[in-house]
Amino acid sequence: MNVAEKANVVVDGVGMDFAVKGGTFTALNDIALTLPRGSFTTLLGPSGCGKSTLLRIVADVIQPTRGTVDLFGMTASEARMNGLFGFVFQDPVLLPWRSALGNIELPLEAQHVPKAERRERAMAVLELVGLDGFEHLLPAKLSGGMARRVAIARALVVEPSILFLDEPFNGLDELRRRQMNVELQRIWSATGTTSLLVTHNVADAVFLSDTVIVMGRNPGHIIERREIDLPRPRSIDNSLSPDYIAHERALTALLSDDYKTRDD
Ligand SMILES: Nc1ncnc2c1ncn2[C@@H]1O[C@H](COP(=O)(O)OP(=O)(O)O)[C@@H](O)[C@H]1O
Ligand SMILES: [Mg+2]
């Protein structure tokens, strides 16, 4: 199936029950969402609402108990086996004995891409994430922000059709996080990769997203879908303006309502 023919990623009726001591625990119920091709979508919600579980289902890391996932006309496992996925996780987990460039080349080695082409493609994404000049540094010599850039480059080097980002900027200080958001926006604009971000950070969600899916807990469910119609490119300066704050306020209110209705 040609990826261009069927544009969207469609999740329908998805639920997830985990086997736990004494029975089952429903982590997700009745999840439906559509990610238009090339869009940036964020799953926003409190810790434990099932964001990572949902991302892992779409990425074929785990299979849902109920429901279907369609990625550009393929099943999740077909899409994964066709190399359509790029992953960036909370912890960059770079191989410490390999340079920045060597780490970015890794997924291409797994695909048996010839050495010269590997080098060329890794250098191209290294430049894309703004690390040219640092390609020979070992991970121990990289700052937190640089390590995240390497992780993003490593995910993009396979030219994925969909990029999964699970709390990619956790642990960075506030300013660095904002700067990485600007970088991620630029990279996303340059590549046009359909992106699915998981975060509990309201400001990050507003800054980066076309659409924010607000999730609540017990069991994990979708509370609301909010379009972020702010013009792009978005800047740190603009992100302090009333338009941004209005979105943040609305999202925060939705999250607070969910907290109020729970007794934890
Ligand atoms: N393999 C598992 N077995 C049992 N429970 C799980 C498993 N994975 C996740 N959970 C539970 O599902 C809920 C959602 O987890 P998770 O998706 O990691 O939430 P989030 O990413 O929003 O913080 C949590 O209560 C978590 O403890
Ligand atoms: Mg999580």
Image (cartoon, grey):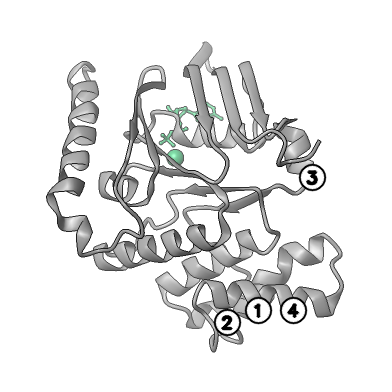
User: Contact (CB < 8 A) between labels 1 and 2?
Assistant: no
Q: Check disc 1 and report the residue beneath it.
A: 123
Identified by mark 4, the residue type is: Arg
- Crowding at dot 2, Cα within 10 Å, few <14 / some 14-19 / many 20+, comes out as some
The location of residue 16, given as percent across then percent down, is: 55, 19
Q: Earlier in the sequence, mark 3 or mark 2?
A: 3
Say whether mark 4 is within 8 Å of ligand 2. Answer: no
| Measured Cα–Cα span from mark 4 to mark 3 | 22 Å
**Local crowd size for mark 4, using a 10 Å CA cut-off: few (<14), some (14–19), many (≥20):** some
Please name the amino acid that badge 2 sits on. Answer: Leu
Q: Quadrant of the C terminus?
A: top left
Please name the residue that numbered disc 4 is placed on: 119
Place residue 158 in its image quadrant. bottom right
Residue 82: mark in rendering: 3
Q: Give the residue type at disc 1.
A: Met
Amino acid type indicated by mark 3:
Asn
- Closer to us: mark 4 or mark 2? 4
The answer to whether residue 18 is seen in the rendering is no
Give SS at disc 3: loop
Above or below, 70 against 37 in this view is: above
Residue 121 visible at all: yes
Query: In the drawing, what numbered circle is on residue 138?
Result: 2
Image position of 185 with respect to 116: above or below: above
Task: Tell me the crowding category of disc 1: few under 14, some 14 to 19, or many 20 or more residues within 10 angstroms, Cα based.
Answer: some
Q: CA distance from mark 4 to mark 2?
A: 17 Å
Asked whether the residues under the numbered discs 4 and 2 touch, taking CB atoms below 8 Å apart as contact, a structural biologist would say no
Mark before the other along the chain sequence, 1 or 2:
1
Which numbered disc flags the more N-terminal residue, 4 or 3? 3
Q: Position of residue 156 (x, y in %)?
A: 62, 61
